[in-house]
Amino acid sequence: MQVCGVELSSATSRWRESWPPFGGSYECAGHSCCISGSQRPSCRVQCCQVPRCTGNVAHLQKEDKYSCVDRSTSYLHVQTLRNFPIEKLYGEVVLVRLDSVLLLDPLGLFSCSRKRTLSTIKYLYKAGGKVLLVTSWDPVLQSVNPVLKSTESFAEYMSSLLQVKVIPVNGVPCLTSCKKEERVQNDIILFENLLNFRGENANCNDFSQKLASGAAIFVNDSFSLSHKIRASTVGITRFCYASLAGFHFEEELMQLLKINDSTRRPYIAIIGGSNFLRKGPALHLLASQCDGLFLVGKLSFQIMNGLGIPVSSCLIEKNATKEVLQLIEIAHNRNIPIYYPTDLWCLNSNNNEQLEIFDSAELLSGLISLGWTPVDIGPSTLERISSLLSSYKKILWIGPTSFDLTEEFSVGATQLGQILNKASHNSCDIILVGVAACKAVKGMSDSSSQYTAFENESIVWEFLKGGILPGIAALDKSYPYQIPWDDVFSDTTQPLFVDIGSGNGLFLFQMARNWEGLNFLGLEMNEKLVVRCLQDVTLAGKRNLYFLSTNATSTFRSIVSSYPGQLTLVSIQCPNPDFNKEQNRWRMVRRMLVEAVADLLQVNGKIYLQSDVESVLLGMKEQFISHGKGQLVVDSDGRMENPFGVVSDWERHVLARGAPMYRTMLRKV
């Protein structure tokens, strides 16, 4: 068999080397600690055990980061509208999920976010897409903003912002609700408030399908709902062939990732609010990344109690003791300071107008019983924060400074906002999280360009806890790294053979041995298999073979498009039949993969499809022919023989039991 001038002849040998043995050793190190404002805690941290590989894998460590993505964060690397081929938008129906709050904030802290959202819509419109807009607003927002009085008034407002006619459509939000003339016109369509439909909050499958009916592409530009499961952010992605992040969503996600970025140091977190138990994992993460923590609000009482300072029992979360001590131990290990308020504004419960400032220790040791209640941090504490921040290059403020969560007595937040505003002019990165933090700086001159702001605390807390954000996880994925092909292959000018779903890699190992004039790349979701394959690649000294751990269905384009040479052949062999059922959102052969392969494959390049289940093969073949844009034709079909003379593990198993294999070879014209 010849593919683009490269002869693929039969091979009789099979690569049968066994997997290398796995070994490991453990090492640990101790650290000292200093806790500001207190004596050292009596508890000690046990040494941390860190596995260290001892196998002979010379270049695996260097390249491993390109192959095995951290599964805890890999879902954050999503396909974006910015990187989606613009020519594929022309003539497609594109449904965009918007955040109405951002659109109503022309001059505030989120004015840049508003501009990015409008840019998303304009970009799609100018690219020739039929744009459908969906959003939601609650009754409270509607009562204070006349723009949200009706779908018609909001559509008129959007028309003025976009300088394009926006047509309001009431009823079930789907393309079939539009009049025929509205569908064919080039105007933008705005659907009714999604909260008027119970299926939205319930993530109803039927409602999601109606919402997506007629739409090929979904663009999410409502980052504020990332922590929630909604039909318009999660359910809809099952019914659109491409689900992308809009310009605003992309920027917000990048800013979210910066919270964990440790390149700007020293880094301090000012953390307020309450509920230490629920926030424990997030606080532990911040303690492991920051160079200092300053706890305010009710969280500070828990730390003070953990450090042995007497605190009234009515202020202590008794079920959070373990998490508090763990946080102190992490700080002890890393030798970072934990700060807490030195004075507090207090309210007399017998006279709601009587406010006084007390020393923290004095208050907590006895004044609580006399009717005094802490409501906010005092001036001495603010002075201490101000003096500390001058030595930090990155500051995170998350949660309110007040103790009772009411704005009436929250003077600390305003003054802290002024302190941070001053710090921002000294080349300090400021991240604001929560309504209290965002309001504290809103209205300050040039504030929108100086801060990274997240009004929705829940998203950031969930992210810091390591939880999955459903609105992000539902979008299509991109490969998170630029692959250094010259380090991967010895000759990147050689044609590339990609095996999607490469499994244990034995098929590609034999192929790479038989045909040194080709480079072979295996794409496999199972990370453990990829690690073992890469170790074998190193042991065998193969420089024309490599493996990546990824879901090729959505990452194929971002991976292969950067390869310097030509894509000559793509194979998909024996995919799981259950995984390839039509209702499976992440079935392997979908329009996104087919279009990527068809676009990147060189002329006369080939696609080899194989399965022991005839219906699976026919389904894959139908997808490629249907979405191949007329570029793919059948080269060989039916009961054709294996053209390579090398069989996969599953193929060998099927043939051994006397069952048939079904194969198709497609060619790009």
Image (tube, helix red, strand yellow):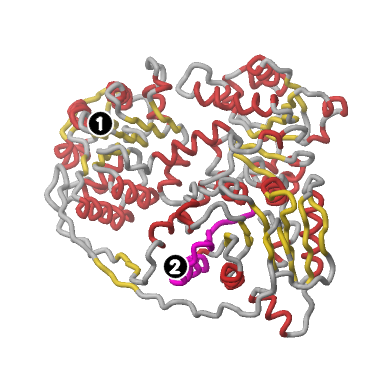
In this view of the protein, can residue 265 be seen by the observer? Answer: yes
Name the quadrant of the N terminus: bottom right
Query: For this rendering, which residue is in front, 62 or 591?
Result: 62
- Mark 1 or mark 2: whose residue is earlier in sequence: 1
Farthest bottom residue?
657
Q: What residue type is labelled 2?
A: Thr
Q: Which residue is drawn at 24% across and 43% down?
A: 291
Q: Does the magenta stretch include residue 552?
A: yes
Q: Label 1 vs label 2: CA separation?
A: 59 Å
Relative to 556, does residue 10 appear above or below in the rendering?
below
Dot 2 surroundings within 10 Å: few (below 14), some, or many (20 or more)? some
In this view of the protein, can residue 204 be seen by the observer? Answer: no
Q: Mark 1 points at which residue?
A: 377
Label 1–label 2 contact, CB within 8 A: no
Residue 290 in which image quadrant: top left
Q: Which amino acid does label 1 sit on?
A: Ile
Residue 206: x and y in percent read 75, 48
Query: For this rendering, which residue is in front, 496 or 9?
Result: 9
Q: What element carries label 2?
A: helix
Q: Which residue is drawn at 46% across and 32% down?
A: 455
Residue 513: x and y in percent read 57, 70
Q: Mark 2 points at which residue?
A: 538
Query: For this rendering, which residue is in front, 599 or 398?
Result: 599
Marks 1, 2: nearer the viewer: 2
Q: Does the magenta stretch include residue 321?
A: no
Residue 341 in which image quadrant: top left
Farthest left residue?
39
Residue 50: x and y in percent read 30, 65
Residue range corresponding to the magenta coloring:
528-553
Q: Residue at x 56, y 44 (%)?
A: 78
Dot 1 surroundings within 10 Å: few (below 14), some, or many (20 or more)? many
Q: What element carries label 1?
A: strand
